[in-house]
Amino acid sequence: MTTQRKFRLLEGPNVLEGVKRLEGAVKDGLEGIDQTLRGVGLSELHTKLTISEVNATRLALFKHLNASSGQFDAVLDKIAGDHLRTILGPDLLVQTKLNLSIQLPDDVGSQLDLHSDCWSGDTPFQVNLWIPLTPCFASNSMFLLSEEKSINCIRLIKENPTLDKTLLSSFVAEADFLVISRGKAIIFNPGLIHGNVPNKTNQTRVSINVRFKSAFSPDASVSHVSRSAGSYYRKFRFSEWTELALRLKQLNEF
């Protein structure tokens, strides 16, 4: 495991095994959607899948991956559980749905402009887990700004509320694009500035992302109640102490 101030790179046998499990689930889903996609490497999806077809395929895979609540909890725990417990503590909530991204070469519709997840209501007291299922490099990857660059960018926006955020591309340098080989993952704070640009490489990027928070850390603001526990998050792993405390709390409410 490599640690940087802006993210932690997760690697090792457990991470690799978990990534392979998720990759297999995605490939199974693709085969169920279209038999012609059977055996196609995820990095080569653009050879069989057109840009006009990618969103319908992504939505079908999203449903496939989330068909049964918690079916990949053991896999996520294997990939990141120890790191999450170190950062957030033993009592963890997880986002109710796994998210899937497919970025074909030259697909401008898959661009995700520079942003902080907090702008759409996510709490900064959470951790984002980003799991690429294909090699990520250059423009097929995600960019993630450092703590300092993120803070400077956010301050500029706060000082200029009407500023067109698409004009902030100067904050993003080539070095901000993550280079991650298959079989690794990262965790990072959602308040940091991140996003992507049109994929100008000759490889498709497929990735999964999901969010975690402590059961006892603050939710998002009241103006974003859709991001609260019970709707946006569900139980992931609780300590035995907390499980007991919750049972006793319920029993003692006369």
Image (tube, rainbow, N blue to C red):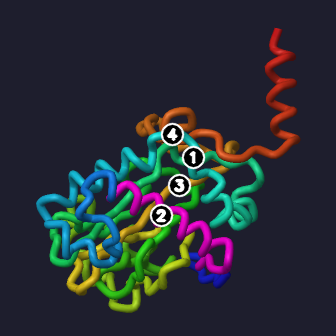
Q: Residue furthest top?
A: 254
**Circle 2/circle 1 CB separation < 8 Å:** no
Q: Secondary structure at mark 1?
A: loop
Is residue 212 or residue 120 the one in the foreground? Answer: 212
For discs 3 and 1, the disc positioned in front in the rendered view: 1
Which residue is disc 2 drawn over? Answer: 24
The quadrant in which the N terminus is found is: bottom right
Residue at position x 88%, y 41% in the image: 241
Which residue is disc 1 drawn over? Answer: 71
Mark found first going from the N terminus, 2 or 1: 2
Q: Residue furthest bottom?
A: 175
Which residue is disc 3 drawn over? Answer: 211
As measured in the structure, the alpha-carbon distance from the residue carrying label 4 to the one carrying label 3 is 18 Å
**Circle 1/circle 4 CB separation < 8 Å:** yes
The amino acid on which the numbered mark 3 sits, given as a three-letter code, is Arg
Place of residue 16 in the rendered image (x, y in percent of width and height, measured from the top left): 60, 75
As measured in the structure, the alpha-carbon distance from the residue carrying label 2 to the one carrying label 1 is 14 Å
Place of residue 156 in the rendered image (x, y in percent of width and height, measured from the top left): 33, 71
Mark found first going from the N terminus, 3 or 2: 2
The amino acid on which the numbered mark 4 sits, given as a three-letter code, is Ser
> What segment carries the magenta color?
9-30
Which residue is disc 4 drawn over? Answer: 68
Place of residue 93 in the rendered image (x, y in percent of width and height, measured from the top left): 63, 46
Task: Using a 10 Å C-alpha cutoff, classify the residue at mark 4 as few (fewer than 14 neighbours), some (14 to 19) or many (20 or more).
Answer: few
Q: Is residue 191 visible?
A: no
Q: Is residue 115 above or below residue 2?
A: above
Does the magenta stretch mainly form a helix, a strand or a loop?
Answer: helix
Residue at position x 45%, y 45% in the image: 66
Task: Using a 10 Å C-alpha cutoff, classify the residue at mark 2 as few (fewer than 14 neighbours), some (14 to 19) or many (20 or more).
Answer: few
Q: Is residue 228 visible?
A: yes
